[in-house]
Image (cartoon, grey):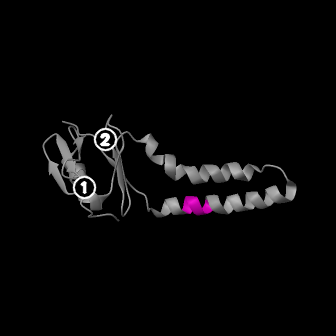
Amino acid sequence: MKYKNITFINQRARWKMYFNAAGIFIMVIGLVDLLRNNHYSFLMAIAMILLYIPVIYPLRFKDYVRFQKHLISFKLGKQKTQIIRPDRIREIELFRDKMIIWTGKKKFSKVNTAGYSNEHIFKLVDLLEGKNTR
């Protein structure tokens, strides 16, 4: 049986910082050009594209997990995107085809994990438990 893959995206990756730094630098140059020549610069459009690439990058994946130190957002299959803080999780129950994430006494989220590889599910559980956030 072929399992579906989950793409893990580190929100603190260096390439995202480089895109943002380049976008801000080009935007400053565009603003200086705007103030001097009093017309909209093509540099501003390039700067906006550079700033939005890290934001729209996950949209090309069907199944992804975006993580940083204190926040995890993931979308598996046709489910809606779930945003969870690892420090608010009380318990994680893992079954063969689903995962239940308890965030309170009566608050929980069900995640359908059928068809995904066990390795990726365990990596997601580790991230939700606050491990491996690098």
Badge 2: residue crowd in 10 Å (few <14, some 14–19, many ≥20): many
Q: Name the residue under label 2.
A: 76
Left or right: 7 with respect to 110? right
From the viewer's side, name the closer residue of 73 and 19.
73
Tell me whether circle 2 and circle 1 mark residues in contact (CB < 8 Å). no
- The percent position of residue 132, horizontal first and vertical second, equals 29, 64
- The percent position of residue 76, horizontal first and vertical second, equals 31, 41
Q: Mark 1 points at which residue?
A: 123
Q: In which quarter of the image is residue 134?
A: bottom left
- The percent position of residue 18, horizontal first and vertical second, equals 55, 62
Q: In the image, what residue type sits under mark 1?
A: Lys
Left or right: 13 with respect to 118? right
Q: In the image, what residue type sits under mark 2?
A: Leu
- The N terminus - image quarter: top left
User: Which region is colored magenta?
Assistant: 18-22
Badge 1: residue crowd in 10 Å (few <14, some 14–19, many ≥20): some
Q: Which residue lies furthest to the front in this view?
A: 106
